[in-house]
Amino acid sequence: MSDEDALRRLFREEVSDVPDDGFTRDVMQRVDRLRRRRRMVLGSAVTVGAAVAVPAFWQALQAFASAALWTHLAGTPAINATALCLSAAALWVLSVSVEA
Amino acid sequence: MTAPLSDTELIARVVAGDDTRAFEQLVLRHQAIVRGFLRHLTADADHVAQETFLKAYRRLTYFRGDSKFSTWLIAIAYNEMRQMQRKRTHQNKIVAALSLEVHDGHAEAPEEVHDLPKVLAWLEEEERAAMLLSYVYGYSHREISLVTGLPVGTVKSKLNRARVRILERMNATVSQHV
């Protein structure tokens, strides 16, 4: 038998099946924990982001409404309704991105 | 009966819809090769293997299919093992001392020449990984280079050196007992 054959035989004997023995279950439990943690972090980030962005957006809208051309419309129900709709849309987009 | 999905199809499902069942299939399919490889390199094989699959899950979007999925996993496993070893320098010294004792005992026992774990203990870590990938898993030099991060030429020389070292030791042991 050549040296190379001896080496091949030595290593080939070691090719054996490694039984799962619950390994996959343990990995999947950790994957689930990782996913839950990710969702929590993302959810917190979105809540904080919304808490900062919505009032800022609202103030910007108010400022825009009271600008020269729109002064006569400022504070009217039409502008307030638009602002509410836009805020709701922004929140909706944020919540969809959290679910995704 | 439907044919089992390929690795590429399962990966696409995980990436597109965070399909954990698909990822579970990937783990089931590849756990043996990853754990089998690591068992020859570290005493903490199953822990490193778990970390490997978690890292693979987090980085699955970066898998481009340039190599086989199993090669990509083995590369992560090898890097993960080396990182952990760096963190546990003290522990490694103890393990090295133990493997030296095992090796010393080996020279006196001719029947152990065909005991792979003991033969592997004669080698340096990179040589051990290269020999396992080449002889047990049939990896090409290029694939071993991808896994270990060593240039192909270095892989070839490490394999040659490991072969020579094993054969010299095996022959010396045999001649001692003839």
Image: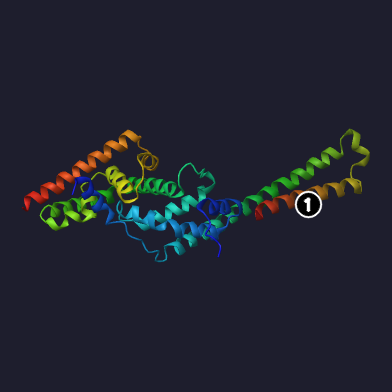
Q: Mark 1 points at which residue?
A: A88
Chain letter, disc 1 residue? A
Residue pictured at 13% horizontal, 55% vertical: B105
As drawn, B45 above or below A56: below
Residue A70 drawn at (x, y percent):
90, 37
As drawn, B62 above or below A36: above
Between A87 and B35, the one lying in front of the other is: B35
Relative placement, left or right, of B91 versus B15 is left
Between B138 and B100, the one lying in front of the other is: B138
- Give the crowd class for mark 1: few <14, some 14-19, many >=20 residues within 10 Å: few
Residue B108 drawn at (x, y percent):
10, 54
Residue pictured at 53% horizontal, 50% vertical: B8
Residue B136 drawn at (x, y percent):
31, 51
Q: What residue type is labelled 1?
A: Ala
As drawn, A19 above or below A39: below
Between B144 and A70, the one lying in front of the other is: B144
Residue B126 drawn at (x, y percent):
29, 43
Residue pictured at 89% horizontal, 33% vertical: A68
